[in-house]
Image (tube, helix red, strand yellow):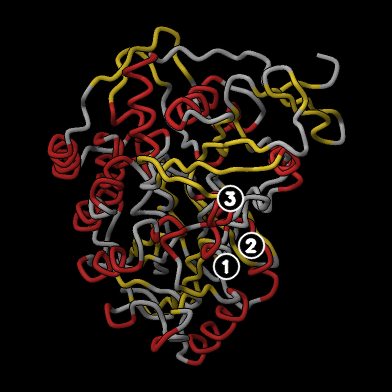
Amino acid sequence: MPPRLLHYSDVENAYDDPDRIGRLAGLVRSLRDDDTLVLGTGDNTAPGVLSMVTEGRQALDFFAAVTPDADTFGNHDFDYGPDAITEIVRESPQTWVSANVAWADGERGGERFAREAGVVPSTVVATDGATVGLTGVTEPKTGSMCPGATGLAFTDPVAAVRRESARLREQGVDAVVVLSHLGSGDDELARETDVDAILGGHVHSRRVECVADTLLARPGANARGLLEVDLDSALSVDAVTVHDPADAPLHESVADAMDARRADAGLDEVVGHVDEPITRDRAVKHTGECRIGNFIADAYRWAADADVGLQNSGGIREGPPLAGDVTVADLVSVVPFDEPVTVAKLSGRELRQLCREADGEHVQAVADRWHAHVSNGLTIRRDGSGVEAVHLDGVPLSTDDTYTVATTDYLFHTDHEFPVLDEQHRVERLSTQYEMLAAYARERGIDPAVEGRIRQAGE
């Protein structure tokens, strides 16, 4: 019989919910048999609260329980640098396939990343019924998106898959499957290569479609879905079954391991209380001003004694609302990155441009969204064509004046968002983001409101 594929991806901060990650593990175990391959498509070690304090090693508990057959790298798997993910590769049971990640320069320039730890560009896996060729690719912009990926090169994924697909076909495999962390790039991959299925990640929404006679499947993020794919001679959307881990049996040893790691990390200190729950879902953080964005931006400004605090919308991670007693772990889950708050000096012209770049048309990843949250005192007025005016404490920005801005250090590294910011603007690094949020919560409480900081013209 044709093999079945069980596909998980972008597990990310599900490790911070022991029940959820335990049920994903339980679901995989309950569905697996001799004709099943278990496959991951990146961002399955980071980000998250436990991820940050263990540098991704909490994923080893999950991997040991479900013994995946193969995985590939997502951009966040490099959050803690090449050495950290290489050690995870060494200690995890699955084969890691990566056809487009290499060392960028030096003695190893051009060499496949982590080949000494067992990473291969492609592999053939046999089940009782067939042989499946697997290869993997990662978003080419990872080098500019992730400071931990500095020193690595992410080559053209289409060329990489063409090369590996040809090799796999020569070996006579029954199907070629790509483990992809490209997101929207999966469509081009389907049109430009000879593969049977692309199991995707990176974009957090679920997807099951056929493009150019290739099955494209994506389970969504944070262990809220597992896809079962039946490989047959005519792959179609009917070959995919969506499973909800919430209904699965609990794998108690995985859940217990997460509880133990959390206790050891001392993440349960209560730093504030929220009476009205503060949501942080995708719709809220990308549509304009919101309470969670205001809280973060105000904390940055307060911590740095800056003129402006700014948080990129994509850096706010989705999760349950902040409600009731708020712990350090809750705040880590909001911005689970081991990066400092950084202070920059910008001219008025540059600060105005920074605000304009918050509009979706300036962001490479996702257009038609709002990409910044700003601190109290700064107001941004938008019209149909973008940002029309920026004021600080009611006064228009002065082109010739200099302003201090506190934001995440990530924005100085990447050209993916807010390209006006670069290394020359940085004047100071403070403590890690979540530490600034915790300090602010202890001192000022957690009671943000929507105040008209980001307005449409005429409001």
Q: Where residue 220 appears, x then y in whole percent?
A: 49, 45
Q: Is residue 84 left or right of residue 396?
A: left
Query: For mark 1, does the 10 Å Cα neighbourhood hold few (<14), some (14 to 19), or many (20 or more) residues?
Result: some
Residue at which label 3 appears: 425
Tell me the quadrant of the picture where the C terminus can be found. Answer: top right
Q: Is residue 163 above or below residue 341?
A: below
Q: Position of residue 152 (x, y in %)?
A: 46, 73
* Earlier sequence position, callout 2 versus callout 3: 2
At a point 73% along the width and 48% down the height, the residue shown is 362
Say what secondary structure mark 2 lies in: helix
Q: Cα distance, mark 3 to mark 1?
A: 26 Å
* Marking on residue 124: none
Callout 1 secondary element: loop
Q: Mark 2 = which residue?
A: 185
Q: CA distance from mark 2 to mark 3?
A: 32 Å
Instruction: Give amino acid for label 1.
Output: Pro
Q: Between marks 2 and 1, how big is the CA–CA gap?
A: 10 Å
Q: As drawn, is 452 to the left or to the right of 272?
A: right
